Image (tube, helix red, strand yellow):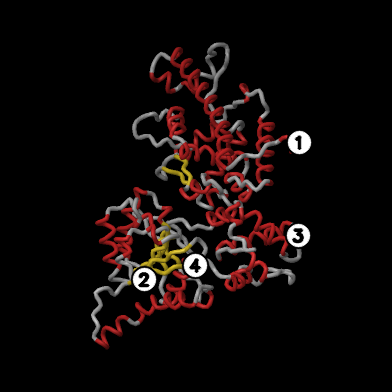
Amino acid sequence: MQSESVEPFVDNWAYLRAELTWLDRALSLAIARQRKETKEVDRAARSRADRVTSHWWKGLVTLEGETAYDSPVESMRRRSTTPKASYQQQLEAKIDISQQRGILLGLPLLCRRLQLSVAEKNLVLMALAPEISRRYGRLYNYIQETDYPGATGLPTVDLILRILCRSDAEWRSLRHCLSGDSALMQHHLIELKSAQTDPLLGRLVKLADPLVTYLLADQPTAIALEALLSLPTPLTTFGQAYEPSPAPRSSRLTSHPTPWSALILPPALVADLEHLCHRVQFAQAVDATWNFQSPHPGTIALLAGAPGTGKTMAAQAIAQTLQTPLHCIDLCQVRPDDQSRYLQELVVQAPTVLLLKSAQHWFGRNAALSNADIHQFLIQRQQQGITLLSVHHKQTVMAQWRQLVQAVLEFPLPDQSSRRRLWQRAFPAAVPLDPAIDWNWLARRFVLSGGEIYAIAREAAIYAAAAAATTVTMQHLMQAYELAKGTQGRGKRIQA
């Protein structure tokens, strides 16, 4: 196939439409096959028992001159006139030319980053489809014979295996991806919805909300993907295994060694963060010795800044200073129907240091919780410990809640001097670095957050390892940056 004749995808949505066209064909074949089979069974069956046991007798009774079998590995090859490899090659060619033109596509980036197979990619696509159109949910319900009010519209493991697998080997391999130590499961990108006692085949497959957001983005970048893969799940305990309980619990992060000197932030901001600790460390002594009576011994602070500007590291430094664990919940990963339970859990636990990431989900205009519940929670937190509300923009928190906040701390993008230090600190001491790397040029040229710099540094190390290089060089850094920038908008943050 000549690359000159291959047109790139216009954008990520054009690519998704092409993938969904394939899924439409696969589902139409499955529906046609099911209708034909149902009609044949209804004609031959004499009782309800006959219908229930049809998967046995269909292989013995000839219907319309063709033996039929009900198997989880039914093949679609009889109706296929175009070799599947040909379609896949055409798709890969369009993906490659798109990425050469700087058009980044979310699902292919994910597949290459995690080395997913074509079957795993199509698994993600099937689980993503109901997030794009409810039509797919209705089709899934029809094929699964769950077409009744209240049905979820999510595909079961069984449906995914029946649609995607053409042999026993493919069936076993893809099933293992949903039950074993696959990359999708290790990164908590897929959720299996159902009781643990249900058979795996009957469980519903749902993509994690952050993954859906990434895959449906107009311009999904490599940096956004790395941030997605590094996200902790709401029910993950850092540093130790989490034992599930009937009621959800917040994450309990054991503070990593993060002294204040490790934070590359403006000195005034560091001083304000340290003062949050002082409010806890010295409040009791001040009140007892000098007879103050504070109505609000606790502190609520709003941390506002772009992703990667150091808000979580600052929270870890606060917890370490106070020698207490940091309890953290990323609210964007909490399902709407679980939010009240999370709130009640926090009321009961009353952690000393609490970080609520994506706080706009509780304190913004479209919060799933009632104003009364939020107000009661904030009043309680004013009486105990430190509560940190983390958002990208402070305006996303409603004014009525900002009035109950004692401190609004804004985390800016690092200046050139700070960026130079961030570049140098992004590499662990064990990484061999080329002495010719121009740190000053990198800091001057690219206006990036600390999180973005770290992601690029790690990607550069991967390029160096793949090339069997003895050191990480400027060439590797530029390769990593070109992969990560993704959009022309990123170019607006390049200094002349």
Residue 247 in the image: state x and y as whole percent: 34, 55
Per the image, label 3 sits on a secondary structure element best described as loop
Q: Nearer the viewer, mark 4 or mark 3?
A: 4
Q: How far apart are labels 3 and 2 at the CA level?
A: 49 Å
- Give yes or no for contact between labels 3 and 2 (Cβ–Cβ under 8 Å): no
Q: Residue at x 42, y 45 (%)?
A: 196
Q: Amino acid at mark 1?
A: Gln
Quarter containing the C terminus:
bottom right
Q: What residue does disc 3 label?
A: 468
Residue 164 placement, left or right of 368 = right
Q: Residue at x 29, y 61 (%)?
A: 400
- Looking at the image, tell me whether mark 4 or mark 3 is earlier in sequence order: 4
**How many numbered callouts?**
4
- Image mark for residue 2: 1
Per the image, label 4 sits on a secondary structure element best described as loop
Q: Is residue 401 above or below residue 63?
A: below
Q: Nearer the viewer, mark 3 or mark 2?
A: 2
Q: What residue does disc 2 label?
A: 407
- Image mark for residue 301: none
- Give yes or no for contact between labels 3 and 1 (Cβ–Cβ under 8 Å): no
Quarter containing the N terminus:
top right
Residue 306 in the image: state x and y as whole percent: 49, 61
Residue 143 in the image: state x and y as whole percent: 46, 28
Residue 366 placement, left or right of 469 = left
Callout 4 environment at 10 Å: few (<14), some (14 to 19), or many (20+)? some
Q: Amino acid at mark 4?
A: Pro
Q: Residue at x 38, y 80 (%)?
A: 278
**266 or 262, nearer to the observer:** 266
Q: Is residue 193 above or below residue 55?
A: below
Residue 159 placement, left or right of 291 = right
- Image mark for residue 412: 4
Per the image, label 1 sits on a secondary structure element best described as loop
